[in-house]
Structures are given as C-alpha cells and as structure tokens.
Image: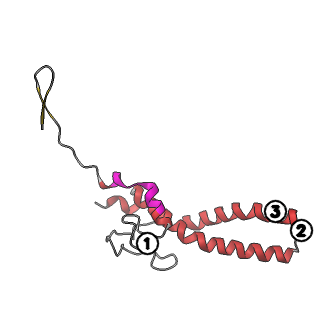
Amino acid sequence: MEKVSQDGDTLTRAPQTSAPAEAERDTRRSMLRGWKRRCPHCGNGPLLKSYLKVNDSCPVCREELYHHRADDGPAYLTILFVGHLMAPLLHLAFVTWRPDPLVLFSFFAVGCVALSLYLLPRLKGAMVGYQWARGMGGFGNTA
C-alpha cells in the first residue's frame, strides 16, 4: 500500500512482521491456567496426569510440557505460604481461647496438611505456567 506525502514523495509501508511465539506468551494468563492445572498454552488440556506428575504433552494442543524444571520450587512455596498463614493463626488461637495443647495441635496439624495438599499441585502448575510463558528451560526452544 502506498501513500503520498505532503511534499509529493511516494511512501511505502514496511511489511509487518509477526512477533515470535515467545513474545505472545502472557505470563499472568499462563500462570493462572497452571494454577487451574490446565495447559499453559491452550488452557483446555490437563497439565497433570496424577497428583503431581506433569503430562509429557497436552492431549488437546500437543504442546510439549516435559521441559519443565519445577523441582523443589512448589514444595518450597507451599511451605512458605502455609507457614506464613498458619503461624499467626496458631498464635491468635492460643492467645485468644487458650485451648488444650492437644486440641490446638490436632486442629492446626489437620489444617496444615489440608492446606498443603490443596496448594502443592496448584503451585506446581503455576510454576510450570511461568516457565512456559518465559521460555525457561527447554520451553524457549519451541517454535
């Protein structure tokens, strides 16, 4: 497409080049899809095939997921979040109601285990989504 400038010169537009696939990866959306335990690419396929085992590839869009390197990151974040949530609650419950120590331990042990089991696969999914969006590890080599 040509345009004519005010001084009579003919101008042509440079062809638009498409951005690389890595630039189109939205980190927030990918992490949210991972939190929901869905494929960070399409958002439809399951990310995990068992409690914490990541699928080698998405059954819907065929995106390869075996590149992830979550390692101990999700466990570390789970401990961090559970500790920072439960420790102040434990202190508050003890100071406010002064329950029997066995009762206090029972409630907070069950609460910590339940919260940890809830958070661990979601944080792993979010971490895999983050790695996919940022092209970390083997994800950066995909086209």
- Residue at image coords 47%, 65%: 34
* Cα–Cα gap, marks 3 and 1: 37 Å
* Residue neighbourhood size for the residue with mark 1, other residues' Cα within 10 Å, grouped as few (<14), some (14–19), many (≥20): many
> Mark 1 or mark 2, which is nearer the start of the sequence?
1
Could you tell me the amino acid type at mark 3?
Answer: His
Give the position of the C terminus as an image quadrant: bottom left
Could you tell me the amino acid type at mark 1?
Answer: Leu
* Residue neighbourhood size for the residue with mark 3, other residues' Cα within 10 Å, grouped as few (<14), some (14–19), many (≥20): few
Is residue 71 in sight in this rendering?
Answer: no
The magenta segment: 22-32
Q: Which residue is mark 3?
A: 91
> Mark 1 or mark 3, which is nearer the start of the sequence?
1
Q: Which residue is mark 2?
A: 98
Residue 82 percent across, percent down from the top left: 67, 65
Q: Is residue 24 above or below residue 124?
A: above
Q: Please tell me in which quadrant of the rendered image residue 132 appears.
A: bottom left
Residue 116 percent across, percent down from the top left: 63, 71
* Cα–Cα gap, marks 2 and 3: 10 Å
* Cα–Cα gap, marks 2 and 1: 44 Å
> Mark 3 or mark 2, which is nearer the start of the sequence?
3
What number is the disc on residue 47?
1
* Residue neighbourhood size for the residue with mark 2, other residues' Cα within 10 Å, grouped as few (<14), some (14–19), many (≥20): few
What number is the disc on residue 113?
none
Is residue 143 in sight in this rendering?
Answer: yes
Residue 9 percent across, percent down from the top left: 11, 24
Could you tell me the amino acid type at mark 2?
Answer: Arg
